[in-house]
Amino acid sequence: MSTLTFRDATEDDVALILEFIRKLADYEHRLDEVIATEDELRKWIFEKKQAEVIFALEDGKEIGFALFFLSFSTYISNVNLHLEDLFIDPEYRGKGYGKALLKKLAKIVVDRGYGRFEWTCLAWNKPSIDFYLSLGAKQKDWNVFHLTGDELRDLAND
């Protein structure tokens, strides 16, 4: 019988965090967009404490991760736990580990007194959307926008 446990990432895990980020990006057909480095992850996650990472472990082996950070909701005047990335290695899927990881994050939200647990999902990822809906999550009518690279610099310098 396999045992699922969780552990918080430490600074020694930076290479493993980047490995999981790349696995997720590959699954999302966006590996070419990953420019993250170990040094940048170390700086923003561990030195500046702008995000947190939890690993899911089966029998002591890291088989998945969640990376999250806080945002603020003016409507509820409280912070949100925003899940940026969640990934379970393909050979460990179908065992309830993704749901267990989401439950762990939900418990963090409740225990810390945050107001909301939120995340985004790619529109084409129907298996994940169906999974999230089965948990009681609601799709909101928001479109996500972002600026990066030249467009970001152009706006900043306009």
Image (cartoon, helix red, strand yellow):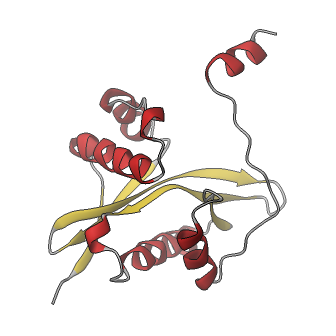
Q: Which residue is drawn at 26% across and 64% down?
A: 63
Q: Residue 135: x and y, percent?
A: 58, 83
Residue 123: x %, y % from top left: 66, 59
The residue located at (61%, 56%) in the rendering is: 122
Above or below residue 35? Residue 130 is: below
The reply to whether residue 11 is visible in this rendering is: no
Look at the picture and state if 112 lies above or below 154: below
- At x 59%, y 69%, the residue is 126
Of residue 89 and residue 17, the one placed in the foreground of this image is 89
Rendering coords of residue 8 (x, y %): 31, 59
Outermost residue toward the top?
A: 157
In which quarter of the view is residue 155 placed? top right
Query: Considering the image in quadrants, where does the N terminus appear?
Result: bottom left
Left or right: where 131 falls relative to 80: left
Q: Residue at x 40, y 61 (%)?
A: 87
148 sits left or right of 51 in the view: right
